[in-house]
Image: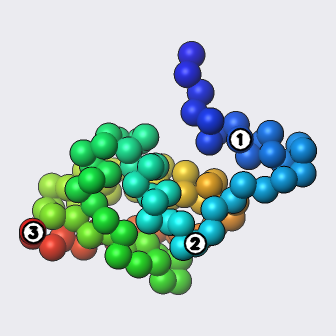
Amino acid sequence: MFIPLKSVLPQITNRVGISVAIKEDQIPLAYKKVVEEILNQKAASASRVLFLHHKILTIEVPSSAWACQLQFSQAEIVGQLNVLCGREVVERIIFKVTGN
């Protein structure tokens, strides 16, 4: 059985008293990794973080199909990002279709 490291790392680091929480400026990279793990590499490559403002993460996607697919995983993506940050940094995600 495979258990992702990020799911056990916070408990391990809390026990030894160190923190591995990412900073807000690391959200774009963390977002890509989280989406790749939850969905796949193609979904991670098709979307791009535009900005984070008042706990709302705005993501650029090339089509409404990608927005819909990512929307279905929004709660899991938000949850994983907040776990990586060690606190609630993202409350929800808005997907902006650019049509590129």
Question: Residue at (57%, 16%) from the top-left corner?
Answer: 1
Task: From this view, report whether residue 1 is shown above or below residue 75.
Answer: above
Name the kind of residue labelled 2 in the image: Glu
Name the kind of residue labelled 3 in the image: Asn
In the structure shown, which secondary structural element does the residue marked by tag 2 occupy?
A: helix
* Label 2 or label 1, whichever comes before in sequence order: 1
* Label 2 or label 3, whichever comes before in sequence order: 2
* Label 3 or label 1, whichever comes before in sequence order: 1
Q: Whole-percent x and y of residue 6?
A: 62, 42
Question: Residue at (38%, 44%) from the top-left corner?
Answer: 36
In the structure shown, which secondary structural element does the residue marked by tag 3 occupy?
A: loop
Give the Cα separation between the discs numbered 2 and 1.
19 Å
Q: Which residue is mark 3?
A: 100
Name the kind of residue labelled 1 in the image: Leu
Q: Residues within 10 Å of mark 3 (few under 14, many from 20)?
A: few
Is 72 displayed left or right of 80 in the figure?
A: left
Question: Residue at (18%, 71%) from the top-left corner?
Answer: 97
Q: Whole-percent x and y of residue 61?
A: 22, 65
Q: Which residue is mark 1?
A: 9
Give the Cα separation between the discs numbered 2 and 3.
27 Å
Q: Which residue is mark 2?
A: 24
Asked if marks 2 and 1 touch (Cβ < 8 Å), the reply is no
Q: Residue furthest top?
A: 1
In the structure shown, which secondary structural element does the residue marked by tag 1 occupy?
A: helix
Q: Residues within 10 Å of mark 1 (few under 14, many from 20)?
A: some
Q: How is the image coloured?
A: rainbow
Residue nearer the viewer, 49 or 63: 49
Q: Whole-percent x and y of residue 31?
A: 44, 58
